[in-house]
Image (cartoon, rainbow, N blue to C red):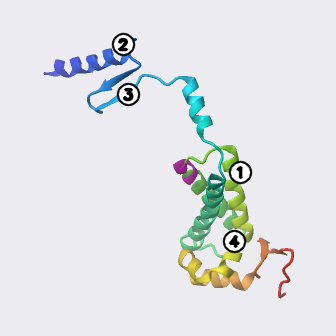
């Protein structure tokens, strides 16, 4: 009985190693499996991924979503509300993990798409509080209503904020 399993295994190996086959039928998988893929085919598949604006926008959104996830986890579960080096490091570390995860799942790993993800993350770190001015009720679901109110009390709309430095965007006069 044990020899029967070995015979089946040896038969499969023989079908795989047969020089006349470019593919073989695997009865367990019920499909044809290619023996190898040529380098030309690999290069062709990589070049087949054409650049598109939609992929670029999705990559920017990956960066934005990563920062939102990082900040909400930091506030909700780590309870790090104050602006400090530790909170910034936590935001960046969690955002990096989420960017790597989402970009691997969505196959957005090219250099230009990584740059777009970085752009989205930086834009969210600097200007994400403007979303809390525009959509406070929606972001209170992601963060908490207390956090949204705290951010709105500390910032003004249409500004860029890094730590305690606020820079007004051109063409907008702030009320401070």
Look at mark 4 in the image and give the residue it sits on. Answer: 128
N-term mark: 4 or 2: 2
Image location of residue 101, percent across then percent down: 55, 52
Give the label, 4 or 3, closer to the camera: 3
Residue situated in front as seen by the camera: 73 or 23? 23
* Label of residue 115 in the image: 1
State the residue position of label 3.
Answer: 33
**Residue lying farthest to the left in this orientation:** 1
Secondary structure at badge 1 equals helix
Do the residues under discs 2 and 1 have CB atoms within 8 angstroms? no
How far apart are labels 3 and 2 at the CA level? 13 Å
Q: CA distance from mark 4 to mark 1?
A: 18 Å
Alpha-carbon span between mark 2 and mark 1: 46 Å
Residue located beneath label 2 in the image:
18
Secondary structure under tag 3 reads strand
The quarter of the image holding the C terminus is bottom right
Region rendered in magenta: 102-106
- Tell how many labels: 4
Q: CA distance from mark 1 to mark 3?
A: 36 Å
Does the magenta portion include 103? yes
Q: Earlier in the sequence, mark 4 or mark 3?
A: 3
């Amino acid at each position: 009985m044990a020899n029967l399993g070995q015979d089946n295994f040896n038969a499969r190996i023989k079908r795989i190693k047969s020089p006349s086959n470019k593919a073989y039928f695997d009865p367990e998988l019920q499909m044809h499996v290619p023996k190898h893929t040529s380098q030309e085919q690999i290069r062709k598949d990589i070049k087949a991924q054409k650049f598109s604006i939609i992929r670029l926008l999705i990559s920017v959104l990956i960066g934005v979503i990563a920062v939102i996830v990082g900040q909400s986890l930091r506030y909700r579960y780590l309870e790090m509300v104050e602006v400090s080096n530790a909170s910034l490091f936590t935001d960046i570390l969690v955002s990096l993990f989420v960017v790597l995860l989402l970009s691997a799942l969505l196959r957005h790993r090219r250099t230009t798409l990584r740059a777009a993800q970085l752009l989205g993350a930086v834009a969210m770190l600097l200007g994400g509080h403007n979303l809390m001015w525009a959509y406070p009720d929606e972001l209170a679901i992601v963060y908490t209503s207390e956090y949204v109110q705290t951010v709105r009390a500390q910032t003004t709309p249409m500004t860029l904020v890094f730590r305690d430095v606020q820079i007004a965007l051109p063409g907008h006069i702030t009320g401070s």
